[in-house]
Amino acid sequence: MNYGLYLSAQGADIQSKRLDVVANNMANASTTAFKRDLAIFQAHNPFDIDQGNPNNLPEELADMTGGITLSEVATDFSRAPLMLTGNPLDIAIEGDGFFQVTDGKQNFLTRNGNLTVNSVGELVTQDHGHAVLNEGSGRFLIPENASEIQISSSGDVAAFLKSEDGVTRIPLGRIDVVKPDHLDALIKSGASLYKSPGRVEIVENAAIQQGYIESSGTNPVTDMMDMIEASRGFEMNVNMIRSQDEALGQLLQTLPRR
C-alpha cells in the first residue's frame, strides 16, 4: 500500500472514532452527573525503528511517523458544578465518592442523586429505579406517612412523622458513599452508572448537599469546537486519500504497457 494512503486512512479512522466520543458527550449534556469521555491517541514509530532495524531512508521519509492509533477512551471524573433544585430527594456529593445503588442483582456506583420513593417505599434513583444502599448494604424504607425527609451533610437520612403529639424524627440510616481503589478501573454501564471490578471503601467525612444535583461534566461549547475540529480532520484525511489515489492512477497510466 502507498504509505501516504496508509497514514491518511489511519487519520480518517481516528477522527471518526473521536467524532463518536464527542457526539456521545454532547448527547449527554443534560444528563445528571454524566462524566465525559476523552479519546486518547498514540503516535507510533516506523516499523523498522520499532524492530530495531532502521534502513537508510531518504531524509523526508526517515522523518515520517509510523502512524497513529486509538490508545483508549478514558473518562474524565472531574467534579461538575452542583445545581440547586430545592427537591428534598435530590442529593449531590460535594467532593470525592459515589453513591452505591442496586438493581437487585448487582451493585453500581453513581453520582446521580436524583432520587424518588417507589411504590413500596424504597428510596431509589428516579431514572431507573435502582435502590440506594445504606452503609450496611441495606435499603432505605420511607414511612408512608412521612411528612418530611431530611438528609444531613454526613448522609444520615431521617423521616419526620406528624401526630397529635407533635413531630417524631425517625432515623433511617446513612447513605453509603464509597470510592474504588482506582477510578480508571471503573466500567461505564450507561445512565451515569459504573461497575467496579475491585473492592470499594467508605468515604470518611463525605459531604452531601440536599436539594442539589450534580450537573453534566460536559461543556457544550468545548464539545462543539472539538466536533468541528474532528470533522475537519476527517474531511482533510479523506481528501488526501482521494488526491493520492488519483495521483497514483495518473502515474500508472503513464507507465508503458507490454
Image: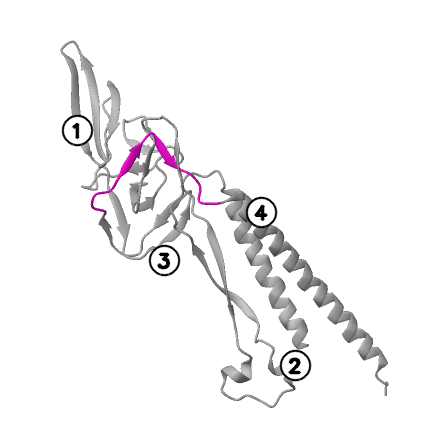
Mark 3 / mark 2, whichever is N-terminal:
2
Q: Mark 1: which secondary structure?
A: strand
Q: State the residue position of label 4.
A: 224
Residue 176: quarter of image: top left
Label 4–label 2 contact, CB within 8 A: no
Labelled disc at residue 171: 1
Taking the spot 49% from the left edge, 42% from the top edge, the residue there is 28
Q: Amino acid at mark 1?
A: Pro
**Is residue 198 placed above or below 86 in the rendered structure?**
below
Front of the two marks 1 and 2: 2
From which residue to which does the magenta span run? 203-218
Q: State the residue position of label 2.
A: 60
Q: Amino acid at mark 3?
A: Asp
Where residue 169 appears, as percent x and y from the top left, is 16, 22
Mark 1 / mark 2, whichever is N-terminal:
2
View extreme (left): residue: 165
Q: Quadrant of the C terminus?
A: bottom right
Q: State the residue position of label 3.
A: 184
Where residue 56 appears, as percent x and y from the top left, is 60, 90
Q: Is residue 59 magenta?
A: no
Q: As drawn, is 225 to the left or to the right of 129?
A: right
Taking the spot 61% from the left edge, 77% from the top edge, the residue there is 64
Q: From this viewpoint, is residue 213 visible?
A: yes
